[in-house]
Amino acid sequence: MNSKEFQYWVAYLLDLMLDLKNAENLFNNKDDNFSRRTYIRTLFATIDGTLYLLKQIVLIETLDKPNVLQESDNHFLKKTNIGQKENFKSTIGIVEKTFDIQLDIETHKHNEEWRDFLTAINIRNTVTHPKRKEEFVITDDNIQLIIRVSKWYIYLICRALDAIDLVKKISKNI
């Protein structure tokens, strides 16, 4: 990855995080159903965007290392229409394999963060595809769960980017 590519992806990541922070500020300044729905939509756009970013980093990193990934991994990395659960689990797994890191993400039904994430996906689906007026109302319990998922996810992404040690990899190629 050259410095121009690096700058592009860092700017992309910062834009995603800034959007999430702005949605959080909107919610904190005026806690109503609109700001709650906006926060949920923005969180999942951030999740989609950061997973896409991780995929691009893997694709760039493995360009000259054809034996790191299986053909099914390469195919997955190029797919665009993937469900949240599969996208998350598979992307993180491929990142761990590519960079030989362990993020210790417990994606089983007994892990509280994972269960919250799956519940948050259902909340997001209801918010983005409402069928009834009542689905525009985000309960206090639901928004608290979304906030927990947001903090967990941001922490996870920071750990992943730190473990990848992207800055060191970039400086070798500049």
Image: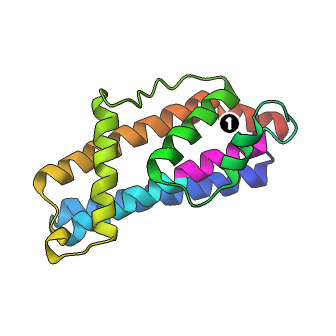
Magenta-drawn stretch, dominant element (helix, strand or loop)? helix
Quadrant assignment, res 82: bottom right
Q: Residue at x 74, y 44 (%)?
A: 74
Instruction: Locate residue 152 relative to residue 90 in the image: left or right.
Output: left
Residue beneath the point at 11% across and 54% down: 140
Question: Residue drawn 20% across and 53% down?
Answer: 143
Q: Is residue 10 magenta?
A: no
Counting from the top left corner in percent of width and height, residue 114 is at 34, 36
Quarter residue 54 falls in: top right
Left or right for 127, reference 44: left
Does 53 appear in magenta? yes
Q: Amino acid at mark 1?
A: Val
Locate the N terminus and report the quarter of the image it occupies: top right
The location of residue 136, given as percent across then percent down, is: 19, 71
* Residue 37 horizontal/vertical position (percent): 26, 66
Q: Position of residue 171 (x, y in %)?
A: 77, 36
Q: Residues within 10 Å of mark 1 (few under 14, many from 20)?
A: few
What is the count of numbered marks?
1
Which span is picked out in magenta? 50-61
Horizontally, is 41 left or right of 63 in the view? left
Residue linked to disc 1: 167
